[in-house]
Every structure is written in C-alpha cells, then in structure tokens.
Amino acid sequence: MDSTSPPADDDQEWIQRNVSTAGKRLFWGLNGPLEHAITVAPSEYYEPDAVMEPYYLGPASDDVDAAPRWHAVSQESLLTPPTSSITVRIDCFDDWERNWADQHRECWDEVHDSDRRRLGPRPGDETLDAPMVVLECCGEERPWSPDKKLDVVAGAGACVTVHDYVSAVHPWLMGMRNEILDVLGKRDDQPPWPPEAKLAVLYLGPGPLRIGYEGKWASWHQRPPAPRNPVSAEEYAEDARRLWERDLARPAAMIRAREEAAAQGLEDPVNQLYRNQHGF
Ligand SMILES: [Zn+2]
C-alpha cells in the first residue's frame, strides 16, 4: 500500500463510512454462482417498475477462457469514503451468539452441575483479569460469532471496489450457506430455514451484513419519505385565526336564529333545545 492509498478500515483515525450508491444498487442473491447472483438496480432505491441490469455481462470474447465482463458498478468503490480493506461480519451470527448467551444466562440455578456448564475467558483473550464468559452450557458449546469474519483487501486499485468485495464475499457466504440457514432459524428459536429458501444480502452496511429472504430486499431499499414542508409562522397564524372565527361563529349563529324566531313569533330556539334535551 503506498502513501496515496485510502486508509484501511481499522486505522486509528475513526471515519464514518457508508455503502456507496454503487453498492446500494446491488440485488445480491445467495442461491448460486456469482455469474447469476447479482442484478443492478437503476438507483439505490427500490422502484417497483425498475428494469434491473445484469451484473455479469458474459465473456469478453468468443474464447472460452476469456475473462468475464461485469457491470460498470463493479469498478466503483464499495464504500464512501473509499477504504483499502474491509472486515466483513454477518449479523445473524452476531445475533445468535448474543441470544445463546441470553438463553443460558440463568442456567446456573437450574443446572447445578459443573460438568454441564463451563466458564472461561473468550478464546484468544490473554489479558490479565479477562472477563469470564459461559463457554459451554446444557451440553452446548457457545457459538463464537467473531469466528465468522472475512477481511477483504483492495485488488488492483487503491480501494476495495464492488467487484473486489462481491468476488471475495460471495464464495465465502455460499460456502457456509447451510450454516447460515441453520443460524437464521436458531436466532429466532426456530428450525433451520429450508435449503430452497431464496436468500439475499439485504443490507451491506455500515455494520454487519444482513442476510434474509430475497423478498425483503425491497423494504430495505425503500426511498425515504419526502420531508414534510415546514409550516411557516404566517400559515400557523392563519390556521389559528380560522379556528378562532369558527368558535366565535357558533354563538353568533345562535343569536341570529333567536332574533329571527322572535321576529316571526316562533318559539325561542334556546327554549326548544332545552325542552328537547330534557324530554318535555
Ligand atoms: Zn444452559
């Protein structure tokens, strides 16, 4: 990495990064090889009538060994501002470890059997006074979400491009597809999701990847609602004036009705109202 490269993800200097528009346009399924996995939306937001573009554009020539061509977004930076490395994590594994620890937090009172509950520091935590965590309980080993991570580094360019990212992460995720289906179920205390479940990456970050049913992709890419026009001081005063006039108009209308009734020798409408209300 030369001095002109963008800083790595774990640099001391903390930088808020977001997924670039190029990254947000990917509709990325986890159901087969990369060539058929991704289509590209025309914008970063879901539009019901949008025509999706293929990410894989076929071989560069008729030669069977020709390099494949990819959509133009493939060469854009995945994050903004760009970075030369990214550590990828997956939220369902993080959730599952947290849920497992919660599920077994209170076991000690019930188990009373040290063989079935083992405590210790996190693996690799060699600090003095490392906090003790439950390593095993009720005959189950604790799932370790930090084991599920992948470091992606920039390829030919200075920053991690969309293609650097998907070409590293797609085979990694596909290689543990069954484990992902299992954890997606366990996380919610349910059986594993079925092998035929159509999975997609719903959210690329910032933060861990979110994987779920591909039908949920649209709701993760909704265009944010347009901001409501702020009400000006003049409009506010006009509304208040209209409400005030309406309240005043009620007694004024009653006064007019009483005058008209008197002029025509009819019963006072206030008396009439009173009688009606009291039933005589
Ligand atoms: Zn337990």
Image (spheres, rainbow, N blue to C red):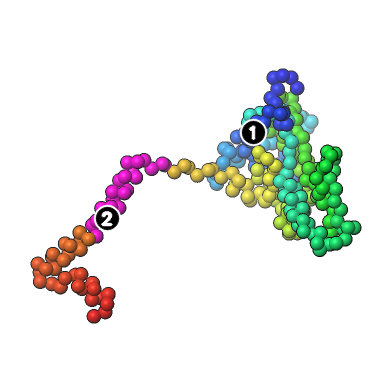
Q: Residues within 10 Å of mark 2 (few under 14, many from 20)?
A: few
Q: Quadrant of the C terminus?
A: bottom left
The percent position of residue 243, horizontal first and vertical second, equals 30, 53
Q: Main secondary structure of the magenta part?
A: helix
Identify which residue, 92 or 164, lies in the foreground.
92
Q: Is residue 22 above or below residue 200?
A: above
Q: Amino acid at mark 1?
A: Arg
Residue at 60% x, 39% y: name it.
Answer: 41
The residue that disc 2 covers is 246
State which mark lies toward you, 1 or 2: 2
Residue at 73% x, 44% y: name it.
Answer: 90
Q: Which image quadrant is residue 247 in?
A: bottom left
Q: Amino acid at mark 2?
A: Arg
Residue 233 painted magenta: yes
Q: Which mark is residue 252?
A: none
The percent position of residue 194, horizontal first and vertical second, equals 75, 56
Q: Is residue 264 above or below residue 279?
A: above
Most distant residue in the bottom direction: 280
For the question of whether residue 31 can be seen, the reply is: no
For the question of whether residue 5 can be seen, the reply is: yes
The residue that disc 1 covers is 17
Residue 105 painted magenta: no
Q: Which residues are magenta?
A: 229-250
Identify which residue, 184 or 237, lies in the foreground.
237
